[in-house]
C-alpha cells in the first residue's frame, strides 16, 4: 500500500517546471550553436566586441554576465538565507561538494582529457577550483596570466 496523494492528483516534476526551465538543455545547446554560427559568419566580431571596454572591463561580457545572473538572483529568497546558514548539514555538504569533490573531479577530468596540453589543463583545474568565473579571472590576474588583450600586439606566437 502506498502512502500519499491519489495518482490522479499527482503531477510529474517536469510538468511543474516552466517551459523555459523544462527545455533548458536545448536552449543552452541552441545558444552555443548560435554563437558558433555567428563566429563563422562574422569572424571579426570577437575583436570588435573586445574593443568596447570601460576601466579595463569588457562591456559586452559585463552585460552578458548580468543577463545570466539577474534571473537567478531575482529568485533568491533572501529572508531564508539566515535559516539555511544555520543548517550545519547543508553548509557542510555544500563545502565538501564545492571545495573537495569539485576540484578533485575537475583535476581528474583535466588529466584524463588534456594530458598533453598543460595550459588548457591548468586552466580547467583553475575553473574547477573557483566557484565562479569571476574568481578565475581574478586568479588569472594574480598569477600574471595572459589574457586576449595582453596577447594582442605582443608579438608572441602562442598566447
Image: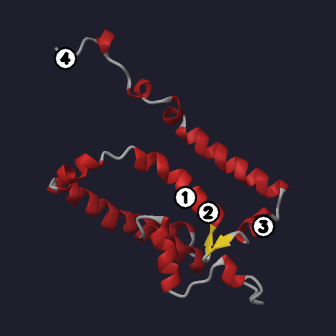
Instruction: Say if 148 sits above or below 156 in the image.
Output: above
Residue farthest to the bottom?
155
Marks 3 and 2 sit apart, C-alpha to C-alpha, by 13 Å
Image quadrant where residue 145 sits: bottom right
State the SS at label 1. Answer: helix
Instruction: Say if 8 sits above or below 156 in the image.
Output: above
Q: Nearer the viewer, mark 1 or mark 4?
A: 1
State the SS at label 2. Answer: helix
Marks 2 and 1 sit apart, C-alpha to C-alpha, by 6 Å
Q: Residues within 10 Å of mark 4 (few under 14, many from 20)?
A: few
Q: Which residue is mark 3?
A: 48
Sequence-first disc among 4 and 2: 4
Sequence-first disc among 4 and 3: 4
**Observer able to see residue 1:** yes
Marks 4 and 2 sit apart, C-alpha to C-alpha, by 51 Å
Instruction: Say if 48 sits above or below 16 in the image.
Output: below
Query: What residue do we see at 48% from left, 69% from top?
Result: 134
Percent across and percent down for residue 61 are: 61, 63
Sequence-first disc among 3 and 2: 3
Residue sitting nearer the eye, 97 or 17? 17
Sequence-first disc among 1 and 4: 4
Residue farthest to the front?
54
Marks 1 and 4 sit apart, C-alpha to C-alpha, by 46 Å
Q: Which residue is mark 2?
A: 61
- Marker disc for residue 2: 4
Callout 2–callout 1 Cβ contact below 8 Å = yes
Q: Which residue is mark 1?
A: 65
Amino acid at each position: 500500500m502506498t502512502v500519499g496523494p491519489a495518482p490522479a492528483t499527482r503531477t510529474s516534476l517536469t510538468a511543474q517546471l516552466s517551459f523555459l526551465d523544462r527545455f533548458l538543455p536545448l536552449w543552452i545547446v541552441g545558444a552555443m550553436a548560435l554563437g558558433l554560427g555567428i563566429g563563422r559568419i562574422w569572424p571579426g566580431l570577437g575583436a570588435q566586441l573586445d574593443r568596447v571596454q570601460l576601466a579595463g572591463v569588457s562591456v559586452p561580457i559585463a552585460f552578458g554576465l548580468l543577463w545570466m545572473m539577474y534571473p537567478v538572483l531575482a529568485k533568491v529568497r533572501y529572508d531564508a538565507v539566515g535559516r539555511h546558514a544555520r543548517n550545519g548539514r547543508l553548509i557542510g555538504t555544500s563545502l565538501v561538494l564545492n571545495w573537495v569533490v569539485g576540484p578533485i573531479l575537475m583535476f581528474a577530468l583535466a588529466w584524463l582529457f588534456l594530458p598533453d596540453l598543460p595550459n588548457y589543463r591548468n586552466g580547467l583545474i583553475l575553473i574547477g577550483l573557483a566557484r565562479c568565473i569571476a574568481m578565475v579571472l581574478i586568479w588569472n590576474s594574480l598569477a600574471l596570466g595572459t589574457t586576449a588583450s595582453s596577447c594582442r600586439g605582443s608579438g608572441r606566437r602562442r598566447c
